[in-house]
Image: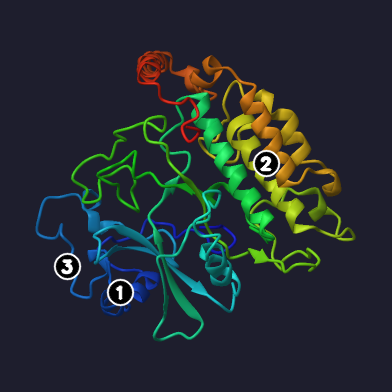
Amino acid sequence: MSAIEETPILKTNEFQPETLGPHEVVWRNRYAWLLSAGYRLRERYNPDWKPSWIGTAKDPFDCEDAHPILFASVNHATRVATGELVVLKSVDHSKFPREIQVMKYLSSEPLGTDPRNHSVHPIDILQDPDEDTLSIIAIPLLRYFYDPPFETMGEVLDFILQFLTAMHFLHENRVIHGDVSLNNIMMDASGLYPTGFHPISPEEKPDFSGSATPKFSRTEKAPKYYLIDFGLSKKFEEGEPPRPTSKPGTDRSLPEYQDETKPINPFFVDVYCTGNLIRREFLDGDPEMAGVTGYYNFEFLRPLIHDMMHEDPEKRPTMDAVLAQFNEILDSMSFASLRSQCIKKGDEKNPARFLRTSVERWFKRVTYMVRRLPPVPSRK
């Protein structure tokens, strides 16, 4: 969910978990319709809901049904036919007229089954019965790409490889994302969490019966990473000049945004934002975001990131060139480097925990070598 589309719903001191907020009532009113369409919202949004903690000594926040949605336009449901948890997103066509069009295009054949396609595919697109301008998109439940933490350099580079492949695929098909940001790339974590996790509180099991901890690492069960949120995306037709979309994305640090006299090429905007995300997450961190501190030992990516973030947009490489250069970097690295521990800046400030984690990961890496698991998980 992009910050451009919607700011998070914040819990205030007056928040009462037994009371639905106005944004939640909208979903409760959709409960019967969505159930008839094959999607059962969480019990909190059942019109007959009675808080499970009432009349007990339980802390409400230890109960699954006490936790409200985080964004007014996003909820979660069980797909009745399969029992799987899915995300339901309300899309307002008057604000984001291209979102569904782009998703349909990227999931159509032959693009839909292309292994280079990392765009999340809709399971269903439902027309809201009461609002002509609203549709509800059902998509798979995904998890933020950075949780759980990366353990090896190869796991990080696998993420970057898939991320760059995803962006290259979009540009190859004349689609710009328009809002490349930390929250708009996620992963299918079903291999890591075979028993699932709660969509609002991912540190918990789906039924809040205990903590959700990964059973496998990324090296053992290579996740696929996905681009989400195509509200600011656009497909350009053959020969159509690449004009910017009407709204800028989350990343406002681009040099071309500072000079309104210069033309803006949205493909070069994507390149910059892709490089900036990698820089902030894995090299320099972001002092304005808690926990985003960067990692040690990724300076070898600096020249590529520098080129992607060049002040002159025309001097930035295309995604085709970016992916080719990254693959050259990857091919030049030794197995030992790819297997090496991924160390987040600041982890060493807790020596006891750092030592324990380092020993645990060393033993894991030994087992990976014995089992002959590839150091870059998706590269078999």
User: What secondary structure is marked by label 3?
Assistant: loop
Please state the horizontal and vertical placement of residue 22, each as a whole percent of the image. 38, 73
**Residue at which label 1 appears:** 28
Q: Identify the residue under disc 3.
A: 50
Residue 171 place in picture, x, y as percent? 68, 55
Residue 233, given in percent of the width and then of the height, sits at 63, 63
Q: Residue furthest front?
A: 110
In this rendering, the answer to whether 332 lies above or below 237 is: above
**Which amino acid, mark 1?**
Arg
Q: Mark 3 to mark 1: distance in Å?
A: 13 Å
Q: Nearer the viewer, mark 3 or mark 1?
A: 1
Color theme of the render: rainbow
Q: Are the residues tagged 3 and 1 within 8 Å (C-beta)? A: no
Mark 3 is on which residue type? Lys
Q: Please tell me which of labels 3 and 1 falls first in the chain.
A: 1
> Which type of secondary structure does the marked residue at label 2 adopt?
helix
Mark 3 closeness class: few <14, some 14–19, many ≥20 residues within 10 Å = few
Residue 276 seen in render: yes
The percent position of residue 313, horizontal first and vertical second, equals: 82, 48
Residue 45, compared with residue 151, is above or below; it is below
Q: Residue furthest right?
A: 261
The residue pinned by badge 2 equals 276
From the image, state whether disc 3 or disc 2 is nearer to you: 2
- Which numbered marker is on residue 56? none
Residue toward you, 171 or 295: 171
In which quadrant of the rendered view does residue 162 lie? top right
In the image, taking residue 230 as reference, residue 321 lies left or right, namely right
- Please report the residue visible at 34 percent of the width from the left and 74 percent of the height from the top: 25
